[in-house]
């Protein structure tokens, strides 16, 4: 009886010991993969932030105006707010109105 209890406890202990080491190794591999992915993500985010900063700086209206004055002989004047469309639907509505007005004008001319 004593041997049977000892043997079953030894088998259970051995099984749990092997299972624990297996789970530990698997989690270590997963952690390594996660760390490598996090490093890649950090590098890409840093590159994205630098690119956004460059874009915002280079497309700033004051920077563009200064570059146009420096490198081109064209007189630069900013756009009126009435010429800026907030969406494609606004542009299409104005274009449709313009086309209909042209057709009306052509009919009157004839």
Image (cartoon, helix red, strand yellow):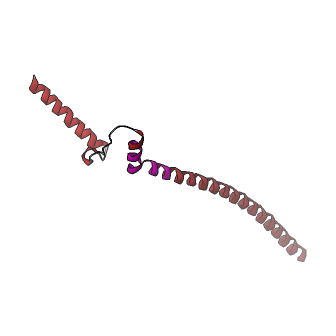
> Which image quarter is the N terminus in?
bottom right
Furthest toward the top, the residue is 110
Furthest toward the bottom, the residue is 2
> Which image quarter is the C terminus in?
top left
Residue 77: x and y in percent read: 30, 44
Rendered residue at 28%/42% (across/down): 89
Q: Which residues are magenta?
A: 53-68
Residue 18: x and y in percent read: 80, 64
Residue 39: x and y in percent read: 64, 56
Splitting the image into 4 quarters, where does residue 26 fall?
Answer: bottom right
Rendered residue at 47%/48% (across/down): 55
Residue 68: x and y in percent read: 39, 42
- Please tell me which residue lies in front, 16 or 35: 35
Residue 43 in the magenta stretch? The answer is no
Furthest toward the right, the residue is 3
- Please tell me which residue lies in front, 109 or 8: 109
Question: Is the stretch drawn in magenta largely helix, strand or loop?
Answer: helix
Direction from residue 96 to residue 77 in the image, left or right: right
Residue 60 in the magenta stretch? The answer is yes
């Amino acid at each position: 009886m004593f041997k049977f209890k000892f043997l079953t406890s030894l088998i259970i202990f051995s099984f749990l010991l092997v299972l624990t080491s297996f789970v530990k190794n698997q989690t270590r591999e997963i952690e390594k993969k996660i760390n490598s992915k996090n490093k890649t993500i950090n590098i890409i985010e840093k590159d994205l932030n630098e690119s956004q900063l460059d874009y915002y700086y280079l497309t700033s209206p004051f920077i563009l105006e200064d570059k146009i004055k420096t490198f081109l002989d064209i007189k630069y004047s900013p756009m009126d707010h009435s010429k800026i469309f907030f969406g494609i639907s606004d542009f299409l509505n104005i274009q449709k109105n313009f086309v209909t007005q042209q057709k009306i004008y052509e009919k009157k001319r004839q």
